Image (spheres, grey):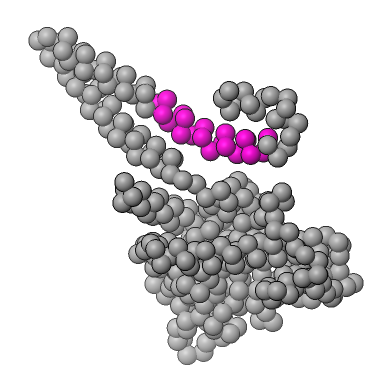
Amino acid sequence: MDLESLLSSPDIMADQTAYRKLSQEHAEVTPAAGRYQRYLQVEGDLQAARDMVSQSGSDPEMLAMAREEIDHAQAELAALEDELQRLLLPKDPDDARHAFVEIRAGTGGDESALFAGDLMRMYTRYFDTQGWRTEVISENASELGGYKEVVLRVAGDNAYGKLKFESGGHRVQRVPATETQGRIHTSACTVAVMPEPDETEAITLNPADLRIDTFRASGAGGQHINKTDSAVRVVHLPTGIVAECQDGRSQHSNKAKALQVLQARIAEKERSERAAKEAAMRKGLIGSGDRSDRIRTYNFPQGRLTDHRINLTLYKLAGIMEGDLGDIMTALAHAREAELLEEMAAGN
């Protein structure tokens, strides 16, 4: 039975978990199936054009038309073959998930916190262009503006798959607003992107391993900050991993969101440990995603962004800071695809 028939079967529709998995599989294979159908169609067109050459005799007009058809079909087949190879590459099962994005100020003091605010603005504008929903889970605002730390939940199709290469160190070079001598300063932030755990597959947390504290939300929230002790901080005692949420007015809601972030951080810790082992066995073009890796430099005086992992430099920093991240996201995805193709070729 094909996927479409299975999706419409009453038994599958009654089982939400099975239906969701089949729907995801259907969404993944549909593009490849469509391109393969086109490949078969163009193959038929190519054979028809070759037959036309053998049947055209001495008619120069027919011969020229047939050869033009052959050239066009061969070019399209080559492009389709390349596209199919990419579509059939093994997929990260987490790519389709929603994501948590953490932005933390690093070296550079107040200027680093201001840059964290700029990164948040850049990302949220990009999320808007993708039609994704953004929710602030927790924030620790800096006194001069920006953030010491902010955690966002990003809900949208393939959010984690598109954003996962943003994890790492982001370095900025510019003249701070507080600099009177006009000197360029260098500061840095770290970004961590984690897939939102599936409720049916989430790590089971032992209540005995958790310490849950409530506190009054603080920060640049004005009237939006709740004056009661509704903010929640959860500590996972075995690992020391901490998560908090102060966005909602309900303590129950904040606790649920904090637990989600905690589960994502624990899963990310396990993922990073696995990636560190795997990195020793492969060159890792895109990097391990470890937040200590310096992945990108934003040079304001030159209007330049450089991604050090793929040696890509773009001189359109003003647009990028307004959320125009399409070129860099596409380049990183293609670089990863090229790496996977190379690994597959080496394994054959």
In the displayed structure image, the side of residue 38 where residue 104 appears, left or right: right
Tell me, yes or no, if residue 176 can be seen here. yes
Q: Position of residue 43 (x, y in %)?
A: 31, 23
Say which residue appears at 46% left-offset and 46% top-offset: 90
Frontmost residue, 60 versus 80: 80
Residue 130 in view here: no
> Where is 270 relative to 184, above or below?
above
Q: Position of residue 151 (x, y in %)?
A: 67, 66
Note whether 116 is above or below 33 in the view shown. Answer: below
Query: Which residue is at the front of the view, 268 or 108?
Result: 268
Q: Nearer the viewer, residue 56 or 294?
A: 294
Examine the structure image and report whether residue 32 is included in the region drawn in magenta.
Answer: yes
Indicate yes or no whether the magenta region holds residue 93. Answer: no
Residue 183 to residue 162: above or below: below
Q: Quadrant of residue 42?
A: top left
Q: Residue at x 52, y 50 (%)?
A: 92
Hey, which residue is sitting farthest bottom in the picture? Answer: 181
Residue 240 position (above or below residue 83)? below
Residue 47: x and y in percent read 26, 18
Residue 118 x %, y %: 58, 69
Residue in the picture at 41% in, 54% down: 336
Left/right placement of residue 206 relative to residue 79 reads right
Which region of the structure is painted magenta?
19-38
In the picture provided, is 105 more to the left or to the right than 314?
Answer: right
* Quarter of the rendering occupied by the N terminus: top right
Residue 16 image-quadrant placement: top right
